[in-house]
Image (cartoon, grey):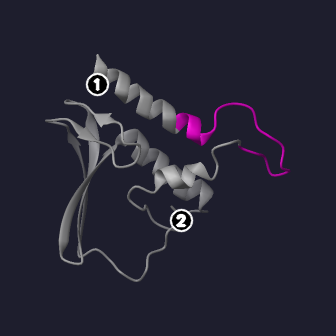
Amino acid sequence: MCYEGDNGYATVYHLREFRASKLYHCCECGGPIPVGARYERLFMVFDGLAKSYHTHLECAALSDFAIKELCADHGTRMVGGLVEELGEYAEYEVDSEGNDLPGPTLWDIFEAIREGYERQAAA
């Protein structure tokens, strides 16, 4: 997530919100993006290869939050990197003195997003 690149840049990078016209799966959590749901689509051409990535708006927001809070606002979104980044912080969150904080972790929030979309798709 705190990925700063390897000096390679996409020649095309287009990010936009859409409403799903068919079922997609989120590139971050793997959960379904049901028909009618709003989602973020990233279209990139990298090394001559074109690819689209679909992301729940909540997962995109959590990814942006993680870059800001966990990476000190330094780095860029690495497609599919949210699970790995949150995994480093999954067990607990601590304050500046190392004390465990009560309440849900970022991982708990991530899991709730995915599970909510899975329940919606099953209904």
Mark 1: few/some/many CA within 10 Å (<14, 14-19, 20+): some
Give the amino acid at mark 1.
Ala
Q: Quadrant of the C terminus?
A: top left
Disc 1 on helix, strand or loop? helix
Q: Nearer the viewer, residue 18 or 123?
A: 123
Mark 2 and mark 1: Cα distance apart in space? 32 Å
Snapshot quadrant of residue 21: top left
Residue 85 in magenta stretch = no
Horizontal arrangement in the rendering, residue 122 relative to residue 75 (left or right): left
Q: Hey, which quadrant is residue 93 in on the image?
A: top right
Magenta residues, start to end: 93-109
The residue wearing badge 1 is 121
Looking at this view, name the residue that lies furthest to the bottom. Answer: 7
Instruction: Give the residue at x 35% y 41%.
Output: 56
What residue is pinned by disc 2?
A: 2
Q: Is residue 60 above or below residue 70?
A: above
Is 92 placed left or right of 119 in the picture? Answer: right
Three-letter amino acid code at the position of disc 2: Cys
Give whichever of discs 2 and 1 has the lower sequence position.
Answer: 2
Question: At which x and y percent is residue 81?
Answer: 45, 57
Asked if marks 2 and 1 touch (Cβ < 8 Å), the reply is no
Residue drawn at the location 41% of the way across and 26% of the way down = 116
What is the chief secondary structure element of the magenta stretch?
Answer: loop
The secondary element bearing badge 2 is classed as loop
The residue positioned 57% from the left and 35% from the top of the image is 108
Percent position of residue 88, x then y: 62, 53
Residue 108 is covered by the magenta coloring = yes
Which is closer to the viewer, label 2 or label 1? 1
